[in-house]
Amino acid sequence: METQKTGRPAPGRPPKQWYGELAGVAATALALGLGELVAAATGGPSAPLVAVGGVAVDAAPTPVKEFAVAVFYTYDKLALQAGIVLVLAVFAAFIGVLAMRRIWYGLAGVAVFGMIGVLASATRPSATWAYPLPTVAGALAAAGLLVLLRCTLPRRVAVSTQDLGDNTGPDTDVAAQGTNTPVQGTSSPSSDAGISVLDGAGRPPGRRRFLALAVGAIGAAAVAVPGGRRLWAQRVAAARAAVVLPPPSSPAPPLPAKVSVGVPGVEPFVTRTADFYRIDTALTVPQMEPKDWRLRIHGRVKRPLTLTYEQLLARPMVERYITLACVSNEVGGELVGNARWLGVPIKDLLDEVEPDDGADQVVSRSVDGYTAGTPTAALRDGRAALLAVGMNGEPLPVEHGFPVRMVVPGLYGYVSATKWLTELELSRFPDFSAYWVRRDYAALAPVKTQSRIDTPVAGKRLEPGLVMVAGVAWAQHRGVSAVEVRVDDGPWQQVRLAAVPSVDTWRQWSWPWQATPGKHRLQVRAIDNTGQVQTGQVHKPLPDGATGRHTIKVTVA
Ligand SMILES: Nc1nc2c(c(=O)[nH]1)N[C@H]1C(S)=C(S)[C@@H](COP(=O)(O)O)O[C@H]1N2
Ligand SMILES: [Mo]
């Protein structure tokens, strides 16, 4: 049995492994916590955990990434973080054990750790001279704590209650701990040397101080990591508030008053930013300062290009109303919104880098590793495909992709609307499958012609007589040419359409209904400018967008 040991450690033998493991984990936790705080103070994604995580994501060979995706499906990022922490804990424990034996071995281990962190942070795309600081500070603190813990631990911690239990079997071990039986009672004759280093509770002196230091360091790290991240978020918020958006060289046309049908209950033509739906895979909202932002345009191009935020803002800007829709939107759902976006036409940048003829896909990457694949043709055909920096007259909100995101009229967000954008790589569809494509969504995803009844609300009791039925319809970049409504199985009726600034936005509609008593079913369908009639065929969102007609039931009485 594993508990049958030949005897307890002899005096002078290195302390129990457990102390070393705890010391290593505590020192590493302290390093990470302090690293987050220093990173928050100096700015940039330079905290050791973030930097090493970033390198791990970049460096992982494709089969490893694919395995992770296959096993963890959408939770691969959580798994990655858990994996990094786990690997780190194992190494930390190892270094701690070394340190408790020979402090120089432990310090050498910390130095190796620190070196990895310094290399990782210094090679981040946005790295500045300050990037290694958090890691260096963390490593120094870890070294200091290891030395301190090592001094706290008496050289001859030879006995713990656990060891004594080992001599008498697991049962007496539990009993001894539970009843606080004096260790002397269970100790064997050979334990004389050990007894001299036990305190009144049967524990070696210094043990309490050691535990207090180690647990204290872990506790401090548990506070410092979220605290540091919050500080960093505040810096980013301040940097965002300081952004002055340039005036567009091509402003959005003034909105005709008639974009609204003026029926209460219909969603406003321009969605309030605070109400704009949000979809992303990020565990925590990526926080990037404009000064750290770079956009690399590369891959199958003749002249690769890297842009800073300042350089981007200096380019001619256009401003457009564009309706964004999520592929996951169910028929009648709310994952669709319309905003006024300010940004640089992607076409201009692509013209500059000169894509190769076969480069039919532009892979966009975000700072958190998300990817989308957009047909190069859609980005160059003259539609208002933008690198957006502004939303409804303000710098992009952090949740919506600050400092820079993509917006492409006519394509679902998952193939076109990458937030926290850092990279455009000219590629080919057979060569690369983006994030959701690897999860069975379609590689090509034009927005489907859709319509929604906003009022009356489903299930509502209505008075007989005039009821305004109204809502929105969308077929981005084709445009909505007609909307029709029917009651029960009656004929399709043409409704009144509101004005629109372009084919890239949704369109409000309204229809006066003379409601008669009884239960009724209201149904809507849109027709786009290509003549396509919205299908009644019901399909779920996977793989390329839901189909069917929004249908509601009301009672008139
Ligand atoms: N970095 C990043 N960008 C992203 C996503 C994401 O998960 N990560 N989701 C996409 C999807 S599926 C949609 S529908 C839109 C939503 O944009 P919004 O959150 O600003 O409404 O963002 C796209 N851009
Ligand atoms: Mo989406």
Image: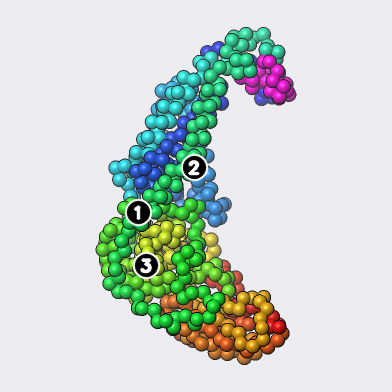
Find disc 3 in the rendering and name its residue. 393
Q: Which residues are magenta?
A: 160-183
Q: Where in the figure is residue 38, as x and y percent of width and height?
A: 38, 40
For the C terminus, the image quarter is bottom right
Find disc 2 in the rendering and name its residue. 84
Q: Amino acid at mark 2?
A: Ile
For the N terminus, the image quarter is top right
Q: Where in the figure is residue 490, as x and y percent of width and height?
A: 65, 90
Evaluate if marks 3 and 2 touch, with contact meaning CB atoms under 8 Å apart. Answer: no
Identify the residue at horizontal 68%, vertical 17% (top origin): 167
Q: Main secondary structure of the magenta part?
A: helix
Say which label, 2 or 1, has the lower sequence index: 2
Q: CA distance from mark 2 to mark 1?
A: 30 Å
Vertical order, 118 against 478 (above or below) = above
- Asked whether, in this view, residue 358 is left or right of residue 546, the answer is left
Q: Where in the figure is residue 533, as x and y percent of width and height?
A: 53, 84
Label 1: state its secondary structure. Answer: helix
Q: Amino acid at mark 3?
A: Gly
Q: How many neighbours does mark 3 have within 10 angstroms: few (below 14), some (14-19), or many (20 or more)?
A: some
- Asked whether, in this view, residue 277 is left or right of residue 316, the answer is right
Identify the residue at horizontal 64%, vertical 20% (top origin): 161
Q: CA distance from mark 3 to mark 2?
A: 40 Å
Which of labels 3 and 2 is toward the front? 3
Vertical order, 553 against 425 (above or below) = below
